[in-house]
Amino acid sequence: MQTKIDEIKQTIEKIRPYIQRDGGDVEFVSFEDGIVGACVGCMSIDDTIQGGIEAILLDEVEGVSGVALIE
Protein backbone atom coordinates (compact mmCIF):
# COMPACT_ATOMS: atom_id res chain seq x y z
CA MET A 1 0.00 0.00 0.00
CA GLN A 2 2.80 2.45 0.82
CA THR A 3 4.24 2.07 -2.67
CA LYS A 4 0.83 3.01 -4.15
CA ILE A 5 0.65 6.06 -1.89
CA ASP A 6 4.16 7.04 -2.95
CA GLU A 7 3.10 6.75 -6.63
CA ILE A 8 0.07 8.96 -5.96
CA LYS A 9 2.15 11.56 -4.12
CA GLN A 10 4.77 11.61 -6.90
CA THR A 11 2.07 12.13 -9.52
CA ILE A 12 0.47 14.94 -7.52
CA GLU A 13 3.86 16.60 -7.11
CA LYS A 14 4.34 16.48 -10.90
CA ILE A 15 1.08 18.34 -11.58
CA ARG A 16 1.14 20.61 -8.53
CA PRO A 17 3.26 23.39 -10.12
CA TYR A 18 0.73 23.76 -12.95
CA ILE A 19 -2.14 24.13 -10.49
CA GLN A 20 -0.12 26.61 -8.42
CA ARG A 21 0.55 28.72 -11.52
CA ASP A 22 -3.21 29.22 -11.80
CA GLY A 23 -3.40 30.33 -8.16
CA GLY A 24 -4.52 26.99 -6.73
CA ASP A 25 -2.92 24.09 -4.94
CA VAL A 26 -3.45 20.38 -4.32
CA GLU A 27 -2.31 18.13 -1.49
CA PHE A 28 -2.58 14.37 -0.91
CA VAL A 29 -4.75 13.50 2.10
CA SER A 30 -5.64 9.80 1.87
CA PHE A 31 -6.05 6.70 -0.27
CA GLU A 32 -8.75 4.17 0.54
CA ASP A 33 -10.71 1.70 -1.61
CA GLY A 34 -9.27 3.19 -4.81
CA ILE A 35 -10.25 6.75 -3.95
CA VAL A 36 -7.63 9.45 -3.49
CA GLY A 37 -8.60 12.11 -0.98
CA ALA A 38 -7.18 15.48 -1.97
CA CYS A 39 -7.33 18.94 -0.52
CA VAL A 40 -7.66 21.36 -3.43
CA GLY A 41 -7.72 25.12 -3.26
CA CYS A 42 -8.64 26.96 -6.44
CA MET A 43 -11.47 28.81 -8.13
CA SER A 44 -12.39 25.90 -10.45
CA ILE A 45 -12.36 23.01 -8.00
CA ASP A 46 -14.81 20.74 -9.90
CA ASP A 47 -13.10 21.23 -13.26
CA THR A 48 -9.64 20.88 -11.73
CA ILE A 49 -10.45 17.63 -9.95
CA GLN A 50 -12.39 15.85 -12.68
CA GLY A 51 -10.71 17.25 -15.77
CA GLY A 52 -7.18 17.30 -14.47
CA ILE A 53 -6.15 15.67 -11.24
CA GLU A 54 -8.47 12.66 -11.48
CA ALA A 55 -7.74 12.05 -15.16
CA ILE A 56 -3.97 12.09 -14.59
CA LEU A 57 -4.10 9.87 -11.50
CA LEU A 58 -6.38 7.36 -13.27
CA ASP A 59 -3.96 7.26 -16.18
CA GLU A 60 -0.71 7.06 -14.19
CA VAL A 61 -1.50 5.07 -11.03
CA GLU A 62 -3.02 1.61 -11.30
CA GLY A 63 -5.71 1.03 -8.68
CA VAL A 64 -6.95 4.61 -8.47
CA SER A 65 -10.65 4.76 -9.32
CA GLY A 66 -11.44 8.36 -8.42
CA VAL A 67 -10.59 11.51 -6.50
CA ALA A 68 -12.65 13.03 -3.70
CA LEU A 69 -12.36 16.57 -2.36
CA ILE A 70 -11.44 16.71 1.32
CA GLU A 71 -12.17 20.02 2.98
Image (cartoon, rainbow, N blue to C red):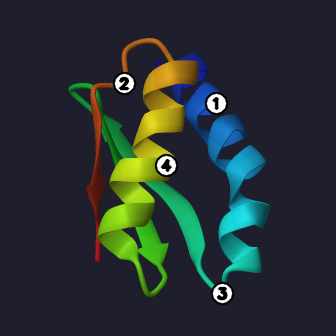
Q: Position of residue 36 (x, y in %)?
A: 36, 42
Q: Residue 27 carries which label?
A: none
Q: Is 65 above or below relative to 29?
A: above
For marks 3 and 1 on the same chain, the one whose residue lies earlier in the sequence: 1
Mark 4 and mark 1 lie on one chain; the one further toward the N terminus is: 1
Question: Which residue type does callout 3 highlight?
Answer: Gly
Quadrant hosting residue 9: top right
Q: Which amino acid does label 2 sit on?
A: Val
Number of disc labels: 4
Asked which secondary structure carries label 3, the reply is loop
- Hey, what amino acid is under mark 1? Asp
Q: Tell me the quadrant of the picture where the C terminus can be found.
A: bottom left
Secondary structure at badge 2 equals: loop
Q: Residue 6 carries which label?
A: 1
Disc 3/disc 4 C-alpha distance (Å): 15 Å
Mark 2–mark 3 CB contact (< 8 Å): no
Q: Quadrant of residue 17?
A: bottom right
Residue identified by numbered label 3:
23
Q: Looking at the image, is mark 2 or mark 3 earlier in the sequence?
A: 3
Disc 4 to disc 1, C-alpha distance = 16 Å
Q: Disc 3, disc 1: CB below 8 Å? A: no
Residue at the spot 67% in from the left edge and 80% down from the top edge: 22
Q: Which of marks 2 and 1 is in front?
A: 2
Rounded to the nearest whole Å, what is the CA distance between mark 4 and mark 2?
11 Å
Q: Mark 4 points at which residue?
A: 53
Q: In this view, does 46 lie to the left or right of 7?
A: left
Q: Nearer the viewer, residue 54 or 32?
A: 54
Q: Which of marks 2 and 3 is in front?
A: 3
